[in-house]
């Protein structure tokens, strides 16, 4: 009588190996998809917070600046109204330029989207290739 692996209670052969590989692959894929979704959600929350703070800041700063400009122009109306308006224009253009530069620097310094996912996939690729 031939003793097969199934009859001895041992491994199930090629079919069980393929099934085990498929299960492992599905679990691995599921984990990676969860990482992508988590990173996407974090980025979405970060962008929403940035937009909310930017909107509030723009409103409050806009009202404050408008009132300050009106105050200064009225204050210097009789003596140096054109000089006051010119200086205020230079101040606003300088402030706007500084804000644009700061925004560009902030946009470049943000973490790369899906960076954790890509690093995990690189680790998986190295392990599958036999590099530890």
Image (cartoon, rainbow, N blue to C red):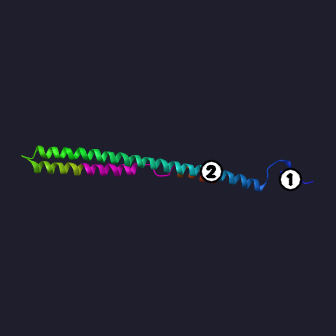
* Position of residue 123 measured from the top left corner of the image (x, y, whole percent): 58, 50
Q: Is residue 111 magenta?
A: yes
- In the rendered structure, are the residues bearing label 1 and label 2 in contact, judged by CB atoms less than 8 Å apart? no
Instruction: Give the overall secondary structure of the magenta segment.
Output: helix
Q: In this view, does 7 lie to the left or right of 121?
A: right
Q: In this view, does 116 lie to the left or right of 61?
A: right
How many numbered tags mark residues here? 2
* Position of residue 9 measured from the top left corner of the image (x, y, whole percent): 83, 47
> N-terminal of the two: label 1 or label 2?
1
Q: Residue at x 45, y 47 (%)?
A: 45
In the image, 128 versus 98, the foreground residue is 98
Q: Residue at x 43, y 47 (%)?
A: 46
Question: Could you say which disc has been placed on residue 28 in the image?
Answer: 2
Q: Residue at x 29, y 49 (%)?
A: 99
Q: Residue at x 39, y 51 (%)?
A: 108
Q: Which image quarter: residue 76?
A: top left
Mark 1 vs mark 2: in front:
2
Q: What element carries label 2?
A: helix
* Position of residue 74 measured from the top left corner of the image (x, y, whole percent): 12, 45
In the image, 67 versus 19, the foreground residue is 67
Q: What stretch is highlighted in magenta?
A: 95-116
* Position of residue 121 measured from the top left corner of the image (x, y, whole percent): 57, 52
Q: What element carries label 1?
A: loop
Of all residues, the one furthest to the right in this rendering is: 1
Q: Which residue in the structure is indicated by mark 1?
A: 4
Q: Is residue 52 left or right of residue 44?
A: left
Q: Quadrant of the N terminus?
A: bottom right
Q: Is residue 106 magenta?
A: yes
Of all residues, the one furthest to the left in this rendering is: 79
- Within-10-Å neighbours for mark 1: few <14, some 14–19, many 20+: few
- Within-10-Å neighbours for mark 2: few <14, some 14–19, many 20+: some
């Amino acid at each position: 009588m031939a003793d097969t692996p199934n009859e001895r209670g041992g491994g199930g052969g090629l079919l069980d190996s393929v099934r085990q590989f498929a299960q492992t692959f599905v679990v691995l894929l599921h984990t990676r998809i969860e990482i992508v979704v988590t990173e996407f959600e974090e980025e979405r929350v970060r962008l929403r917070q940035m937009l909310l703070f930017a909107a509030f800041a723009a409103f409050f700063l806009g009202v404050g600046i408008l009132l300050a400009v009106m105050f200064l122009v009225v204050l210097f109306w009789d003596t140096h109204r054109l000089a006051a308006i010119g200086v205020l224009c230079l101040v606003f253009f300088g402030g706007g330029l500084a804000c644009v530069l700061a925004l560009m620097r902030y946009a470049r310094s943000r973490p790369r989207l899906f960076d954790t996912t890509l690093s995990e996939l690189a680790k998986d690729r190295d392990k599958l290739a036999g590099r530890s």
